[in-house]
Image: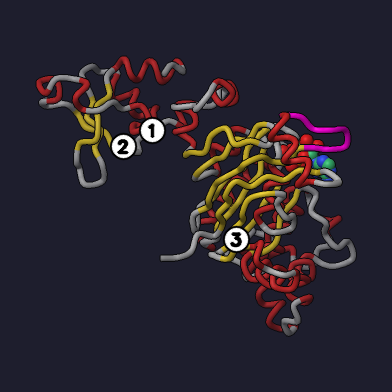
Amino acid sequence: MMAKPIVLEGVSKLYAPRPAQALRRFYSSGRLQPGEHLGVLGVSLHVEPGETFVLMGHSGSGKSTLLRLLNGLYRPTAGRVTVMGTDLGQLNRTQLVRLRRRVFCGMVFQGFALLPHRSALENVAFGLELQGVPRPVRLERAREALALVGLGERERALPAALSGGQQQRLGLARALVMDGDVLLMDEPFSALDPVTRRELQGELLRLRARVRKTIVFVTHDLSEALRLGDRIALLKEGRVQQIGRPEEIVAKPANAYVADFVAGADRQAVLRARSIMTPPEAVGGAALAGARTVAADAPLSEVARLAATGGVLSVVGDAGQPLGVITQRDVLLALAGGA
Ligand SMILES: Nc1ncnc2c1ncn2[C@@H]1O[C@H](COP(=O)(O)OP(=O)(O)OP(=O)(O)O)[C@@H](O)[C@H]1O
């Protein structure tokens, strides 16, 4: 079995002159002293190969700190970070740099630091140049990456001649051209207008199917997280509130904070039949006889249409096996945001 790209076990990071001491004091007294800041506290999570894992939370909740812990840019004050089966704490600087280069293909930021006097093509090829990849090879790979993000026609353009959305695509190409399996994205689309932003999200979803990279994506935007994430971790004040698939977080928020955070979600788009069904025992066998079936993955909008004509729906899995039932009441509650 393939090693998990990233595993975090009880990871904490304090920004303090003496972080270990500050953390001990924080655990015993619940307080920090002036000049000490909590980055993240006791975070455990893992990222599966090929998934898009979203770190979501308000400003200051610890998303960027976590991203820099999981790629070894920061060392944890406590806890363990394991990347592709290797405990980062066991590596010296050189080994760490080598592992990061092998596993991660760079980070995509908002306002990506593009080289202003180099063409789009040379910007993308730059990382390979630093690695000593011969010029013809790196230009060929850079062209492929540019084509992948839809900038094939603009390879000679200087960054300043590109729109904000195009510059962001260029940033993406610059990361994609590198070898690593894991792509880190820190609020890459936040500075873009809403239309361009949605467009680039769509682009990323399409790309993901083609390049098979594992993606860790940071955002404070709920709709972006729900759209892009296979799974989402919601952070508050450095602590994980809930980890789950988008429909799990929306349908079964773990606490009042999560419920409040997801209150504005587009429930019809996010919820699936499986997230609102109840066990078959909930209704009598008689009610199920002749019930219409709906796929477990069907979105709530479709479930609602089917349920509107009355009766109970039988939710079935890929092989047609019964998984649960949905009544009209379940649909109404889900649409209304009830449990
Ligand atoms: N270099 C630093 N020194 C001191 N405190 C820091 C440092 N970097 C981050 N922090 C603190 O750690 C906490 C988490 O910050 P972080 O940047 O990880 O949050 P974030 O969720 O990424 O926020 P944003 O969305 O605003 O970037 C905040 O309280 C922040 O003030």
- Taking the image in four quarters, ligand 1 sits in the one at top right
Q: CA gap, disc 2 to disc 3?
A: 30 Å
Mark sitting earlier along the chain (1/3): 3
Q: Secondary structure at mark 1?
A: loop
Residue 191 visible in the snapshot = no
Q: Secondary structure at mark 3?
A: strand
Please state which amino acid type lies under the numbered disc 1. Arg
Residue at 68%, 45% in the rendered image: 12
User: From the image, which quarter does the N terminus lie in?
Assistant: bottom left
Please state which amino acid type lies under the numbered disc 2. Ala
Q: Position of residue 336 (x, y in %)?
A: 45, 15
Relative height, residue 47 to residue 145 (above, below): above
Q: Is residue 32 magenta?
A: yes
Residue at 88%, 61% in the rendered image: 116
Residue that mark 3 sits on:
182
Residue 310 badge: none
Q: Nearer the viewer, residue 134 or 77?
A: 77
Residue at 70%, 61% in the rendered image: 106
With 272 as the anchor, is 3 left or right in this view? right
Q: CA gap, disc 1 to disc 3?
A: 28 Å
Residue 241 visible in the snapshot = yes
With 38 as the anchor, is 235 left or right in this view? left
Q: CA gap, disc 2 to disc 1?
A: 7 Å
Residue that mark 2 sits on:
296
Q: Which residues are magenta?
A: 30-37
The CB of the residue at mark 3 lies under 8 Å from ligand 1: no
Residue 272 badge: 1
Query: Pointers 2 and 1 in contact (CB under 8 A)?
Result: yes
Mark sitting earlier along the chain (2/1): 1
